[in-house]
Image (spheres, grey):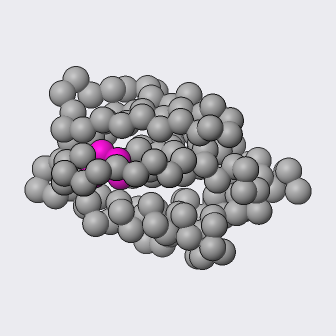
Amino acid sequence: MISDLYSGGILDAAAAIPPARRLAAPDASAKKISRVCGSEIEVDLTLKDGAVAEFGMAARACALGQAAASIVARNITGASVDELYQLRDEMRAMLKEDGPPPTGARWRDLALLETIRDYPQRHASTLLVFEAVCDCLDQLSGKKAVATT
């Protein structure tokens, strides 16, 4: 039901998205766009000692993309590289393979997005921020980023 998709928790998370802020000198930047709805997320990050030291983002996205981006933006500082790759994989599995939502204090709010699994056309916009963050990490590790949205 569409009211499940746009629950109060999802709308609250979307409304709590931090103001757009780009970093002046990021270690890496990435932009992801959903071909389905046109949602767009740009992220910048800097790493220090293998963890996110600074995060900047501009999101022009639907409520679902904004909700995911909002939760990530509020919790990403201090997250390790491995944790962020795992988070992306857990979010993909949650949406596409009926997997459990991410756990732990930092990411537990992402469980709000679990209802999106029943709307495959909305997966791409929800995953944008995770794909953009991992694109940045790929740039920093010298891996070639693979387009998945």
Relative to the observer, which residue lies in front, 47 or 85? 85
Q: Please report the bounds of the magenta region as a residue range.
A: 133-138
Residue 122 is situated, as x and y percent measured from the top left of the image, at 69, 49
Quick check: is 85 in the magenta stretch? no
- In the image, what residue occupies the spot 76% across and 47% down? 6
Farthest residue in the left direction? 49
Q: In what quadrant of the picture does the N terminus appear?
A: bottom right
Residue 142 is situated, as x and y percent measured from the top left of the image, at 19, 51
Seen in the picture, residue 61 relative to 80 is either above or below; the reply is above
- In the image, what residue occupies the spot 32% across and 65% down? 83
Relative to the observer, which residue lies in front, 138 or 63? 138
Seen in the picture, residue 4 relative to 40 is either above or below; the reply is below
- In the image, what residue occupies the spot 64% across and 58% down? 113
**Count of picture labels:** 0
Question: Predominant secondary structure in magenta?
Answer: helix
Quarter of the figure with residue 143: bottom left
Is any part of residue 6 visible from this angle?
yes
Seen in the picture, residue 93 relative to 30 is either above or below; the reply is below
Farthest residue in the right direction? 1
Residue 125 is situated, as x and y percent measured from the top left of the image, at 61, 44
Seen in the picture, residue 131 relative to 108 is either above or below; the reply is above
- In the image, what residue occupies the spot 60% across and 49% down? 124
Residue 93 is situated, as x and y percent measured from the top left of the image, at 56, 70
- Residue 19 relative to residue 9: left or right: left
- Residue 17 relative to residue 20: left or right: right
Is any part of residue 18 visible from this angle?
no
